[in-house]
Image (cartoon, rainbow, N blue to C red):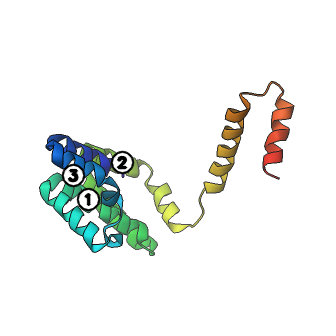
Amino acid sequence: MWAFDSVRKDVQKKLGSEYRKYFKRSRKILFKRFNELSEYQKQKVMVMLSISPNLYSAHFMKEEFFKILDCKDHKKAKELLLEWMDYAKSSNFKRFQKCADTFYNWFSGIINSLNTPVTNGFTEGCNNKIKVLKRNAYGYKNFSRFRKRILHIFN
């Protein structure tokens, strides 16, 4: 999404003030999956995509990536991801090329994550609670007291 957003911003900078405001206000519908948009929203997106071929290509790449995430078959997802990475690497967009490089570096982990429903969301939530506690407390002088407060949060 950040790669697509950088293309959107680049296109937006080159436009006149009227189109720039239109693009800025329509950011959320550009990020949304195309098949989840209403007919009116689809028309708005098509107008924006017709203005810039770069934006059209970036939007296509975004939608193709969502298809990979929706894929239920592990092998099919792997094939689609490899095709997407090759396409992104050969594109003219530096952000998509950087994204493809990152995917190549972490390919086995990404494929494994598509295969299992397990996430680290619970752990991230616990870390967030502890950080909020630290922020609200303005620091604890006594570590034992801080530890007890953390344990109290999770009871």
Residue 59, numbered circle? 1
Residue position marked by numbered label 3 in the rendering: 90
- Determine the secondary structure under disc 3: helix
Residue 2, numbered circle? 2
Q: How far apart are marks 2 and 1 (CA)?
A: 12 Å
In the image, is 69 to the left or to the right of 42? right
For the residues carrying marks 2 and 3, which lies nearer the camera in this image?
Answer: 2
* Chain-order first, disc 2 or disc 1: 2
What is the three-letter code of the residue carrying label 2? Trp
Tell me the residue at 17%/47% (across/down): 18
Residue 138, percent from left and from top: 71, 28
Tell me the residue at 85%/33% (across/down): 145
What is the three-letter code of the residue carrying label 1? His
Q: Distance between the residues labelled 2 and 3?
A: 18 Å
What is the three-letter code of the residue carrying label 3? Ser
Residue 79, percent from left and from top: 35, 67
